[in-house]
Amino acid sequence: MTAAPHGAGPDSSTPVEQRPWPGLDVAGLRILVTGFGVSGYAIADQTMQRGARVLVVDGKDTPEIRERIQILEVLGVEFRLGAEHTTALPADREIDLVVTSPGWRPDQPLLAEAATRGIPVWSEIELARRMQAADGPDWLAITGTNGKTTTVTMLESILRAAGLRAVACGNVGLPVIEAALDPEGYDVLALELSSFQLHWTEHLDCEAAVVLNVSADHLDWHGGAEEYALAKGKIFEGVRTACVYNVADETTRRLVEEADVVEGARAIGIGLGAPGPSELGVIDGMLVDRAFHPERRRAAAELATLEDLSHLGAQGAGPHVVLDALAAAALARAHGVEAHAVRDGLRAYRMGDHRAQHIATIDGIGFVDDTKATNPAAAAASLRAAERVVWIAGGDVKGADLDPLIASAADRLVGVVLLGVDETPFTTALQRHAPEVPVRRIDPGQTDDVAGRTRLMEDAVQAARSLAAAGDVVLLAPAAASLDQFRDYAERGDLFAAAVTRLPGERS
């Protein structure tokens, strides 16, 4: 780290990248915030309060945005809405720093111009790390293609069970800058970080961090698979205690090996088998730690049992959920959390909406909403959680290859119900790898309004119910985006849950 202790405020002419941090003083800085979503609002609010001169630009000009800007406008933040303000840096003022929202691509013209002119472009995460005081909360960070939100909320539950003031933040929950600068002060931040956020971040300096997995996703944004993986790997830069990786995912191991960490930081593996030294794993139905246990070369510390996680699935916790629990446990143990708090936190944990969420068991059939599984890798993990599945799938696959997913799941499929405007990617892969599995295609019809989308999901749930028998699981894990037929993935899951509640039958 090139940080210096925070002392007297810098001269207003000192370039932002040369100002001392932690405790970066933003007074007098001319900051351009690109995008006015949740993080954009937090950036503008926190920097304006500390004396920065803030201009926000956003390509959208909607009543909702107009309503949200009113308070900050009164306090002196300037706004320029409309696409014409996003194509170049403002011509009528100098800019010291651009802080960008994660949705803005690196090749966006305004950001490209800033880079050409030597103006720093930071994420909210980079700004929060620099502004946070030297004695601020420790950071425990999580990234990966799938499983981030489950892991970070599990970690939050474990930390709170240990009596710590902790919060999940970043890509879920609070913006990081709000949590880092909270006036009451947190002990620990549990950060969920996307590849978008990490791309614009250079200094994380976490106590511990994990990359859960890396599979093809967002390649158009990053420019390719290697660039995407490298963005994920930035989470390990500056780690002080533990870099946690998935022993079954060679890319995560490589990212640890290539990371520039503080001397003494350890590589900690997690896996579903018996762990070796410096690993966490599973032995005889127990989650165990051979990484942070004092006698790790000869013994393991019991953290929890699979029974402690049994409430996290219609047929117990799936393998991907167990792996997420091990990742959360590893980060907590790196912070010094005792084994009993890991157990208590996992017992208390409940899945968030739309993430392998058990909706109901009706006539012995489990109904699970994993609408958040919007890519093949996420759907594959969800499918592995049950022995016999009626799979509700389909939507916009964005060019993804479905063959490996369906080949690996074929022996579990009792039936398939297909949503989506274009079912061809699924039907062709199913014909190749699961030709005996019955497939029901739901007529897309009109889905321009809620009534049409409700009818679509109602038909899908009824079709899935007709294919299922006691002991089966009806699983919504679409392996595809939702926008071809639904407002978003959350609406897709909400309509699934509503349709399930209307099914007749005995509930258990």
Image (tube, helix red, strand yellow):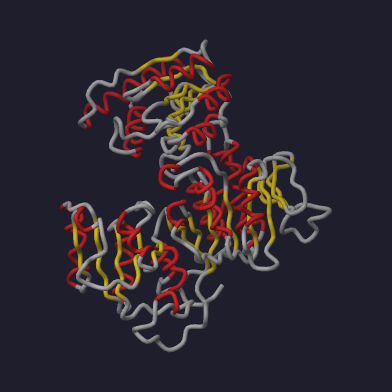
Relative to residue 323, is residue 129 depicted above or below?
below
Does 428 sit left or right of 288 as displayed? Answer: left
Q: How many marks?
A: 0
In this rendered view, identify the residue nearer to me: 79 or 466.
79
As drawn, the residue found furthest toward the right would be: 298
Q: Quadrant of residue 185?
A: bottom left
In this rendered view, identify the residue nearer to me: 45 or 505.
45
As drawn, the residue found furthest toward the bottom would be: 8
Q: Residue at x 38, y 17 (%)?
A: 463
* Residue 498 location (% of width, % of height): 33, 31
Q: Quadrant of residue 240?
A: bottom right
Relative to residue 497, is residue 206 depicted above or below?
below
* Residue 472 location (% of width, % of height): 52, 22
* Residue 388 location (% of width, % of height): 55, 22
Relative to residue 410, is residue 292 depicted above or below?
below
Does 220 sit left or right of 206 as displayed? Answer: left
Does 194 sit left or right of 481 as displayed? Answer: right
Q: Please identify the quadrant where the N terminus is shown.
A: bottom right
Q: Residue at x 37, y 51 (%)?
A: 105
As drawn, the residue found furthest toward the top would be: 436
